[in-house]
Image (cartoon, helix red, strand yellow):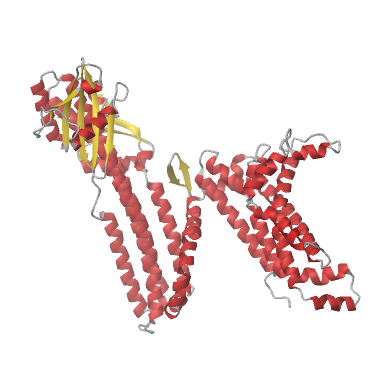
Amino acid sequence: MKSLIRIPSRDELIASLIAIILPLGIIMISTLFVIRDSGEKNNEQSIENRTEVFGRYAALLVSTVEQPKELSNLVRDYKNSVGLNTIAIIAEETQGDLAFLKKRRYFVYPGSEKEGKVLVSDDKNDKRIFDLISRTDSRNMSAKAKDESMIYYVRRVDKGGQTMYIYLSERLFSPNELPVPVLNGLIAALISVFIFAIGLLFFHNFRHAFGLIAIVAFVLYSLSGKELIKRWNAALIKDDIVELSLITDFTKNKKLNISQEEIYKTAPVKVISKTAPSEISPRDDRSLANQILKTYRDHDAKYSFFLPVSKTPYEAIRMDIPIKKIVEEGIGRYYLTLLFSAIIGLLIYILYAIGYVEIFVNNLITYSYAYRYISPAVISTIVLIFIPFIAGIGLSFFEHNHGEYTFVGLDNYIKIITSEGRRLLEPLSFYYTFLVTILWTATNLAIHVSVGLFLALILKNPLLKLKEVYRVILILPWAIPNYITALIWKGMFHKQFGVINELIGYFGIEEISWFSSFSTAFTANLITNSWLGFPFMMVISLGALQSIPQDIYEAADIEGASKWQKFRKITLPLLKPALFPAIILGSIWTFNMFNIIYLVSGGEPSGATDILIVEAYRWAFERGERYGYAAAYSTIIFLILLAYSLVTNKYSKATENIY
């Protein structure tokens, strides 16, 4: 292996750094956003859960303890034990049922000079309490509110003939420092880039191999991020168990007259007596979180946790709930973001490997002024087309269920190809819908091209009068929004009141139920779309006809060619450069003509006239919100149209110069 084969040029060095740092940057920034967002939501949810648990337990204290002084001491000790920001008990002194006669007094407010004082509406904090109290009644026992930094909670307690309220507030927080797994991933990326730089300078022929080393960093980063989100989510369960254990210990130490059943209503747990010591988990927060993750990996769906609540090993709290949904909260969105970012990174690296990045860097430096002019269009295209396109492909690898996204790989594609057990040629089968789509596209194109070309030949006739008027009239179907036209035609095909049945009735034909059979529903769709489609082909054909030199026809007349021969030998070949691209474009439009199918026939009867794009829509919004399945449908549609465009353009040679 030789060293210092040659020093890379400035453009090569910049391109190499772009190809490595940009993909890693995209991956890290996008997934770091999801990780931090998950952490913030986790912290917020944890505090909300804690506030709810403490509020319920404080309500037990209020309803159980009779002596005001004893209650005050218990609340004060309780606040210090759990570390709440604010806890107060408010007594309602009423002189009647009218709200303005009621006074609310701080009965207990540990550590505050407000204890024993009446709430006033001009105090900001008291006003917030009034607002929360107004949202509670005998059915809604609690209310809460949040701002950017705090959560506020009020719980109502009806004690005998008196109403009391527990008021809690807690500070919301979010992690300000980068999590350790993220730092690990970042360090791995920096080391990889450093190795890559050394390889670029000393082993220039191996730059691609060294570049791939840096890509490995994103794998380490992604695994650490996923594990971090799982640990945060597992901590929610841990919080419930630890907090309830604290409440239980506090109750035992104070020896309150509260039954175990009342205590365990504060969280989704059960008390187990005489549990075998070997089944009891240690009361260590880190160990508990690790056990939650381990149990999740081992059992996947459900688990049981045993937590000692006293010194004797024969009394414990058991928490028995499904864990998969809780632990995987946010993992689907993380995978989707990671997949989206990785695809972009891979595309950048492929462009780098084949030399396009170096060419781009060279052009960017040489023609920077030109790139400044086109940058708004490029940015708009990336944001409005490229990013949604990649996001759609990424979504196809996930399954959506009630807001949760689970990575399923190629499962959606397999289900589509296998039609999920349906017969191949029945509605809802991919192959049936694909055949209907091909029939729909072919028949529409045949009518559009033939009618459009026929009208263009008539409008080109020099003897025709009022050409401008005819052109305006014939282009109107194209100018009117197609969804409006579709609804108009749907009304015209109405069995009882439609004008179509009225017209055919004059010829002695019985009225037709247009949407009761496949043939008539398909015909209704075909007529509507033909009305919309022929103006485009007419305009293209008319423009191409006017560009054909007239002396060619004069030469043909001298040779004695007939009209048919001139049309077949001159007109059609010279129309090819304009007409074939229009046919390709028109076929793509027709293949994806959602509005006509959805608005005119609505897929009737029983989805028989649906085409692929309508099926994708129905799977996304009408059949259980299967967004991943619909995204896979859309990706398959794109691949079909891409293959069609490439093959058609290659064999028709539509873009070649014929002169």
Q: Quadrant of the C terminus?
A: bottom right
The percent coordinates of residue 461 (x first, y second) are 82, 66
| Quadrant of the rendered image containing residue 326 | top left
190 left or right of 553 in image? left
Query: x%, y% of residue 497?
Result: 73, 34
Q: Residue at x 26, y 31 (%)?
A: 132
- Residue 67 image point, x, y percent: 10, 19
Could you say which is closer to the camera, residue 2 or residue 647?
647
Outermost residue on the right side: it is 560
Judged left or right of residue 390, residue 53 is left
Visible residue check, residue 421 = yes
Residue 30 in which image quadrant: bottom left
User: What residue is rendered at 38% in x and 68% in y?
Assistant: 20
Residue drawn at 24 percent across, 36 percent down: 152
Q: Is residue 269 visible?
A: no
> To which quarter of the image does residue 338 belong?
bottom left
Residue plotted at (22% across, 24% down) = 263
| Number of numbered tags placed on the structure image | 0
Looking at the image, which residue sits at the far top?
161
Q: Position of 473 compared to 625: left or right? A: right
Q: Quadrant of the N terminus?
A: bottom left
**Is 221 located above or below residue 283 in the figure?**
below
Taking depth in this image into account, of 14 and 207 the one nearest to the observer is 14
Residue 224 in the image, given as x and y percentages of width and height: 32, 54
User: Which residue is nearer to you in this view: 150 or 49?
Assistant: 150
